Every structure is written in structure tokens, then in C-alpha cells.
Image (cartoon, rainbow, N blue to C red):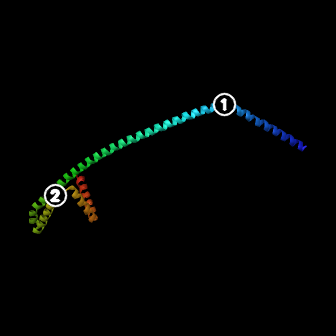
Amino acid sequence: MERDIMAETAATKTAKTRKTAAKPRKTAAKKTVAKPVKRTNTAKAKSRFNAALDEARAGAALLGQEARERAGAYRSQAVSRGDDWAGQAKTRAAELARDGKGKASEALSGLGKVVGDSAGEIDDRFGPRYGEYARSASRSLQTTATRLDQKSVEDLGEDAREFVRKSPAAAVGLAALAGFMLARLFRGR
């Protein structure tokens, strides 16, 4: 009995397998007729899509090139303007430095004259020894004013850098003193 059931099951499976195998052939024959039409439409769609992509890539490349050209033009304009402004600032700074140097020289010379003129009074009040200190200070101020007037602004800058290199502590002290004097000067107003 078992053998009979197994034989029937095997026969049923074989029959179903044969029927199933026959169906794909029929279906395959039907699909082969329909596939060439779909392939043609699909191929056309892919071709159009690829052409659109190529056109988009070319357009993006042109836009990128134009953007780079414009950026280069703007950069060169900015550099040109920056160079012009830097030149104007340097010229103006040099003018201000020369004016400041001239005023400082005049101020030192004037201070030297005032100290020299008051040396006689100092002799009378405190003695000739202190009067000689005043005259020495007056000569020193006059000499400094003359040297300042003779040097260029660049030379003065180099002298200041050299002074800071040789004695940085004194430079910091002088800067602090100058800051204190300027603060007192502007606070009083």
C-alpha cells in the first residue's frame, strides 16, 4: 500500500512538473513578442535620459568655468583695490610720521631753549652747580632735536628696533611711562 501511495505521489509530481514546464515555454513565446517592443521603448528612454545627463553635465561644466572666470576677475579687482588702498595708507602714514617727527623735533628744541633760558634763574636760586645741570640738559635736548630732524622716519624705526633688541626692559619701561603720560594728558581734558 505504501508503495502504491508513493507511486501515485511520484506520478502526480511528474505530471505537475511536466505541465509546469510546458507553461513557461508558452509564456516565453508570448513574452518574446512583447519584449522587443519594451526593449525598444526602454532603449529609447535610456538613450534620452543619457543624452539629458550628458547635456546637464556639459551645462554644469560651463557654469563652473564661468564661475571660476568671474571669481578670478573679482579676485584680481580685490587685489588691485587692496594694493591701491595699501599704497594710499602707506603714503598717508609716511606723511603723518614726517609731520610728527617735525613737531617732536620742534618741541624738543623749544624745551631746550626754555631750560637754557631758565638756567640763569636756577643759578641765582640754587647755585651755579644746578644752573650748569640745566645748561647741560638744554644742550642735550638741542642735540637730540637736531639729530631727530636729520634722520628719516625709517632710520628712526630701525633705531627703535635696535634699542628694543639691546635693552627690552628699558623699552618696556619707556612704553609704560609714555602710556602713563598720555593717559594723564588726555584725562586732564
Task: Determine whether label 2 and label 1 are within 8 Å by CB.
Answer: no
The quadrant of the picture occupied by the N terminus is top right
- Locate residue 58 relative to residue 125 in the image: left or right: right
Residue 148 placement (x, y as % from top left):
17, 58
**Figure check: 46 above or below 120:** above
Q: Nearer the viewer, mark 2 or mark 1?
A: 1
- 15 or 149, nearer to the observer: 15
How far apart are labels 2 and 1 at the CA level?
A: 103 Å
Q: Is residue 185 visible?
A: yes
Q: Amino acid at mark 1?
A: Ala
Q: Residue at x 35, y 41 (%)?
A: 73
- 132 or 76, nearer to the observer: 76
Report crowding for label 1: few under 14, some 14 to 19, many 20 or more residues within 10 A (C-alpha). Answer: few
Q: Residue at x 22, y 51 (%)?
A: 94
For label 2, the residue is 150
Q: Secondary structure at mark 2?
A: helix
For label 1, the residue is 34
Q: Amino acid at mark 2?
A: Gln
| Residue 6 figure quarter | top right
Q: Secondary structure at mark 1?
A: helix
Question: How many circles with numbers are drawn on the protein?
Answer: 2
